[in-house]
Image (cartoon, rainbow, N blue to C red):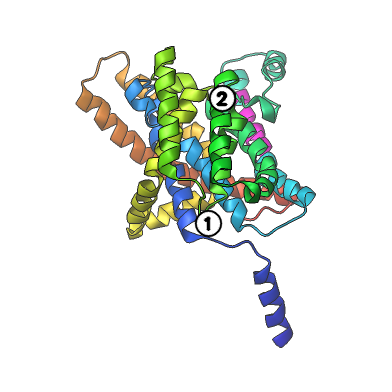
Amino acid sequence: MILREMQDNKRQQFQPQRDNELDIYRGCSMIYITCFLHNFYGVQCIDTVATSMLLITMPIVFFISGASYTLASSKPYLQYVWRRVKRIVFPYYICVVIVTALYFLYECIIKGESGVTFANNFIAQGYYNIFSGKLYDFNHLWFIPPYLAVALLLPLLNKIKPHLSQWGIYALALLTVVVLAIYPNEIWCYAAFAFIGLYYKQHFPANRYVIAVMMACAMMWCVWQGYSLNMQANKFPPNIMFFSYCGVVVALFLPLMGMLCRWVYRSRFFRYYIDRYARMGLTVYLYHGINVHLLQKLLIIIVGDRDLPPIGHLSILIATSIVLFFGNIYLSMLMKQVENSILRAVGITKRD
């Protein structure tokens, strides 16, 4: 009995720390993305300057990724890479197999397309390549390549962090602005927000109001240069305008957003679902596109080309958000079981 308790204590000592607040932020951000944001851009396809101001979720997701890294147990780099592969790459390719099977059923069995044509299109479009970020109409999977790349960079960023002073962080922020003005790209942009996440539970040396002013000045320069105010137009790949806008929001409003998430979590009803969205975040993200596309097809049948008044769009938004809120989590619970069964069948275990 004593030996077993010693083994349990030792096992708990080397397990990654859990942070309840970080789980709350993770669950709330996934709900916001899959139930509301992708409702605007996936179900209803409403792309305006106003709705584009809501596109501040990816920087927050990468901030959470950086924060999570600081709470994980330290491992040699190759072990860390293998863990990321199990957590990201394997589930992604299981998703590729399942989604491809569904599209094969629809295109070849129902619509009668040639299997050879289907296979040639699969290869030509690069759906087999995780770094293409493309999988049929699942446009949201663009996120996987930069997420994997930044995850692999986090150990390096964590080694750089102790050597940066307040002025070093300001210089790094300015360098990021310059780089994205010259060469817009996902990795540099989102790595910056993951780097900020490495200071989670630690004192951030730089003044966030100074960072906000720097980013606001960069935004004004972008306006003077004629950049679009629609952040969707600046997001793929993220340029200086998108980075600067998200920098202002994160610098000024991240504490407020955290407080709002914690307030919502006080509800017993929302606590249940926030916990599950947090626990199955990647699975939710991978498969929620199925619900998005089904709702989009349903709306086309019901609404058609009719021009709805604002109250009509609002009613649809509320109804579809509710459907996605419940549908995403229960679909993901099913797909999680399938995913874990496949991983166990090939001799790989994946922790919930």
Residue 34 point in image, percent of width and height: 45, 37
The quadrant holding residue 7 is: bottom right
Residue 147 point in image, percent of width and height: 61, 37
Whether residue 238 is visible, yes or no, is: yes
The quadrant holding residue 10 is: bottom right
- Name the side, left or right, on which 99 lies relative to 35: right
Q: Main secondary structure of the magenta part?
A: helix
Residue 91 on the magenta segment:
yes
The three-letter amino acid code for the residue at tag 1 is Gln
Residue 159 point in image, percent of width and height: 69, 48
State which quarter of the image contains the N terminus: bottom right
* Residue that protrudes farthest toward the bottom in the picture: 2
Of the pair 80 and 122, the residue shown nearer to us: 80
Q: Residue at x 68, y 66 (%)?
A: 14
Q: Mark 1 sits on what residue?
A: 202
Residue 259 on the magenta segment:
no
Q: Secondary structure at mark 1?
A: loop
- Name the side, left or right, on which 188 lies relative to 129: left
Q: Residue at x 69, y 13 (%)?
A: 117
Q: Mark 2 sits on what residue?
A: 178
Range covered by the magenta-colored residues? 90-104
The three-letter amino acid code for the residue at tag 2 is Val
- Name the side, left or right, on which 161 lies relative to 266: right
Above/below status of 320 relative to 227: below
Whether residue 194 is visible, yes or no, is: no
Of the pair 148 and 169, the residue shown nearer to us: 169
Above/below status of 16 relative to 153: below
